[in-house]
Image (spheres, grey):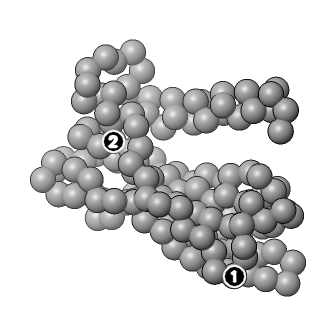
Amino acid sequence: MSNRSARGMSWAVIAVAVMMAPDLAGTSSPAAAAAADPTCGSWVSSLVIPGLSGRACIWGVGAGWKQAQTEVFNGTGSPLTVETLTAALDPLPGDARCTDIQLQNGQTAFCGTSSVPDNNPFEFDRAIGSAHVTAPGRQEQFSFGSPRVG
């Protein structure tokens, strides 16, 4: 990967982070800063397609809102299709379904929910997701989750 494409990807990641937490722009409180960082589960590797992995992240830790995001990384060496990538908040009412994503080797697909209010700081929430992926001659459906957070 060239420096130019790596720089472009860095800006894309920053843009995604800014879009995911628009209410935090310009804030400087420690709680707001912590809420802007995701808490992610471990990468879960595919048992059928070597090099394929996924994880779920929850945004809004310690804040009055939460958002789920799932990611699938293609390190297989060849292109594949993410038929369905889901993201949901448990037990909050937020879910998303992203479909028919063409993923080249080295790319990551993202799917995220909208931000939803979290009015109960004593209830622990988590992000959960699943991916249904096809590659020539193979397919897999697997799921992943983030740690529970307040």
Q: Is residue 45 left or right of residue 67?
A: right
Q: Is residue 149 visible?
A: yes
Dividing the picture into quadrants, the one containing residue 85 is: bottom right
On the image, the x and y values in percent for residue 115 come to: 40, 44
The answer to which of marks 2 and 1 sits earlier in the sequence is 1
Using the numbered discs, state the Cα–Cα distance from disc 2 to disc 1 in whole angstroms. 33 Å
Q: Can you identify the residue that label 1 sits on?
A: 48
Front residue (pair 53, 18): 53
At x 51%, y 73%, the residue is 143
| Mark 2: secondary structure | loop
Q: Is residue 68 visible?
A: no
- Mark 2–mark 1 contact, CB under 8 Å? no
2 or 1: mark nearer the eye: 1
At x 48%, y 68%, the residue is 144
Q: Is residue 112 left or right of residue 41?
A: right
Callout 2: 10 Å neighbours few (<14), some, many (20+)? many
Looking at the rendering, in which quadrant would you find the N terminus?
top right
On the image, the x and y values in percent for residue 42 come to: 47, 60
On the image, the x and y values in percent for residue 106 come to: 77, 52
Dividing the picture into quadrants, the one containing residue 30 is: top left
At x 76%, y 75%, the residue is 134
- Amino acid tagged 1: Val
Front residue (pair 143, 66): 143
At x 63%, y 60%, the residue is 72
Q: Is residue 149 left or right of residue 18?
A: left
Query: Residue 60: which numbered mark, if any?
Result: 2
Up the image or down, 85 lies above or below 118; here it is: below
Dividing the picture into quadrants, the one containing residue 83 is: bottom right
